[in-house]
Each structure stands twice: as C-alpha cells, then as structure tokens.
Image (tube, rainbow, N blue to C red):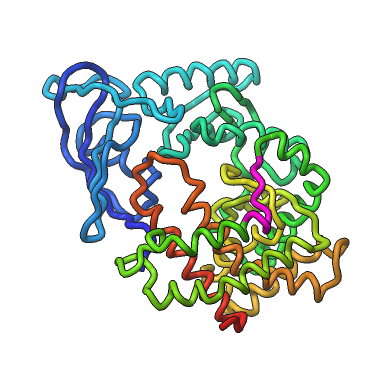
Amino acid sequence: MALIEDRFEDTILVVNGDYGGALPVVRTRDHHPADVEPTRRAIRDTLGIDAFVLGWREVTVRGGVARRLLEVEPLGDLREDQRWISPSELVDGREWTQPGWFDRVREWLEHQARRGGWNIQAVEQIRTWEFSCVLRVQTDQGELYFKALPTTYAAEVRLVEQLTAWDPKHLPEVVGADESARWLLLRACAGQCLEAGAPLAVWRRAARAYAELQVGATERVVSLRALGCPDRSPSTLREAIGRLCADEAAFLVGEEHGLTFAELESLRAAQPWLEAACEELSASNLPLTIEHGDLWASNVYVGDGEPQFIDWTDACISHPFLSLGPLLRSAGWDPHLQDDRATVGEIADAYLGPWAVYAGPAQLRRELELAKPLAALHIAVTYWSLTPPPHLQWWMPRGVPFFARMALELLAAAGVP
C-alpha cells in the first residue's frame, strides 16, 4: 500500500483581486504532492497561462486521487473570461502563499546576480507546500536552487551556511542567503540524485562521506545547538516512545493505512526492548552529532566528486546511527543492487568505517543493530509530534503507522519477540 497518492485533480483559483471565480480542473499523476512542475505545465496546456502556485485551500482523497483546491498567481495577463479571487491568509511565515511574493524574490535574485557577476536566464517554480517553496534558477554560470522556509524551520538557513563553511565538499555552495526572510540560494549539486540508482561502490562512498561529515561535527555540538538544532538524543527518544505507544489514535488502528490491533500490541510488547536500546545508545562511547533527519536517497547527490547532501530541514542532534535507517531502506529499493541483504550490509560497513576511532567493529555493529528499529520510530515521532500545523498534506498522519510498521519489521529481523 502506497504511503502517498500520486494522482491529482486540481481545481484552479487565480488569486489577485476582490472578485470571485474558479477555473477548470487540471489532472496530473506520478509525482510528489509538493512537486508543482507537472501542475504548472498542465495549467499552461489547459488555460494558456503561466502560473505561480501559492498553495492549497483544501484537499479530499478518495479512490486513489487527491482532489485539491489550488490557488495560483498568474505570471502575465489573463483572458477576459478569466476572473480573480482574493488572497489567502499568511500562516507561519509562508509568504510564498501571497500574490507578489514571486516578484520580490526575482528582484532579490537579480541583486544576487549583479553582486556575483552572473546573469539569470530563467526562474521556474518546482516545489511548494507548507514546508518550503523551491525555485530553479538558470544562469549563464550554471544552475542554482532557491529555497524559502516558514518561520518554524528558519534555523535551516543558518545551519546550512555553517555546515557549508565547516565541510564545503559535502554540501552545495551557498550563493546567497537572507536569514530574516528565510531565503537560501544554493549552487546545484554535481552529479545525479542517488534515488535514480547507482552501483554498490557509489552507495558505499555516499555512506562513508556522510559518516565523515558526522564525525567532523561531533566537536561542534555546542555550535549546532546555538544554530537551532533541537536535541533528539536517545534519551529524548526513550521518553517519546512511551507517549507515542500510549496514543492509539496516532496509529490509525483499523483504518486503511493504519496498524492492526495485533501490530499495535506487538509494538507495545517491544517497548521495554526499545527503551533499553535507547538507554544503551545513551551510554555509548559514540558522541552525539548532527542527524540529518531525512536521509533518503533523494537528498543525496553523487558524481565524480564527493557526495553532497541537501535538505537539512529536520536536522537535529542525536546518536549518529539514527541517520542511517532511511539511507539503507533506500538502497533496498535500488534495482542496481541485486542482493538486498548483502549490499545493504556492505553499505553499512562503509558507513561504520570512520567511527572506528570511537569503538571496535563488534560494538559498532551492535549499536547499528540497536539503532535500526529506533531510527524508524525516530521518524514516526517526527510525524507524530514535531510536524507543525496547519498543513494539508493528507498523507502525513499515515507516517506514524508506516514507520511503526517498519520498526516492527526490523525488530522481527533482529529476533525481538
């Protein structure tokens, strides 16, 4: 069962003035709900206008289709038969949901271009949702990416600037930033997204590079806290697991995307093991460090140079091995890797290499095995308590049972009854 539907019917509302009116439905499929390039293409094909997507007013899901009421701002003139509605409210600093914001950003980008001595050729919106708005900026000196963040995630701008200064080979270059506006402009990563698939050697190189970044950050935990990285250490996770397991509604028990009653009881039965695992990791010789928070292959880029890591929105301070769960799960989906079990083990070994300065191989492997199911619950807790409302991502409540079920699978593989 898919976590997120990827078929959409969007009724388009064009926003600018004080009059009411709705425009036709556009249909797209096979893309993430936040990816707006397919929707913008469909609007051009259907309505004959270029549009900037401001956001969604409401969404209903049935029959595998997400039906959304979509607000857009036209980038140019409308036809005489097309009418306006008034703008939506601003929530959590999401200025990109307001008409006129795109023009202000383009002015800022032009200022950055004049300072840097490069010329802008095109600016295209590629993603928008409650957590960010992302634009692709084509220039005469290569491709750039602009990201705007809500107030809740303002720390990402400062964090990325500092991480790039500490470890410039593993993050894309920061071309421009405005901390007060929560704007970040980055040079495009070299190479291709690891999600597209790669040979085992490339996966191993990416895992080792990420470990090296984490090892380098172990001496900077005080600075990371000052930058706004929250503490999500194993001791914090231990407390959260108990509260989460007590919240039956969070697991959507008996619903289409929820746990069964038997699965919830299995998770609760494993709670003592999970809490003991948190305590053991808390007592580890491995220091706390930065944890990416969303280390799926989609946030890793690989090429001839060093692997690079993007999208640090959910970064926190924790036991390092909690990062590895998403990356290993992503590897299991790569058709380039024929034997999932063996190749995932080799990727894990590559990741553990830089940590040998803190513990021997047996201890590192034990802590990794403890961390695997905890990493899944670590993400479930994010969906449960750390995602700020309001949002219209209908699939997000499913994240708790989805990652809880993943934790159960990993517990079973580890032989935990």
Q: Which residues are magenta?
A: 229-236
The reply to whether the magenta stretch includes residue 233 is yes
Instruction: State which quarter of the image contains the N terminus.
Output: bottom left
Question: Which residue occupies 46% across, 39% down?
Answer: 131
| Residue 40 visible within the image | yes
Name the residue furthest left.
81
Question: Which residue occupies 37% across, 28% down?
Answer: 97
Q: Nearer the viewer, residue 388 or 296?
A: 388
Report x, y in % for residue 317.
Answer: 69, 48
Report x, y in % for residue 245.
Answer: 49, 64
The reply to whether the magenta stretch includes residue 113 is no
Q: Nearer the viewer, residue 67 or 7?
A: 67
Question: Which residue occupies 50% across, 72% down?
Answer: 268
1 up-or-down from 214: above or below: below
* Count of numbered labels shown in the rendering: 0
Report x, y in % for residue 375.
Answer: 60, 62
Q: Nearer the viewer, residue 407 or 172?
A: 407
Indicate the quadrant where residue 200 lies: bottom right
| Residue 160 visible within the image | no
Most common secondary structure along the magenta stretch: loop
In the rendered structure, the answer to whether residue 1 lies left or right of residue 206 reads: left
In the rendered structure, the answer to whether residue 162 lies left or right of residue 111 reads: right
136 up-or-down from 111: above or below: below
Instruction: State which quarter of the image contains the C terminus.
Output: bottom right
Q: Nearer the viewer, residue 325 or 197?
A: 325
Report x, y in % for residue 171.
Answer: 68, 43
355 up-or-down from 53: above or below: below
Indicate the quadrant where residue 45 lies: top left
Question: Which residue occupies 64% across, 19% down?
Answer: 117
In the rendered structure, the answer to whether residue 383 lies left or right of residue 354 reads: left
Indicate the quadrant where residue 83 lies: top left
Name the residue furthest right.
357
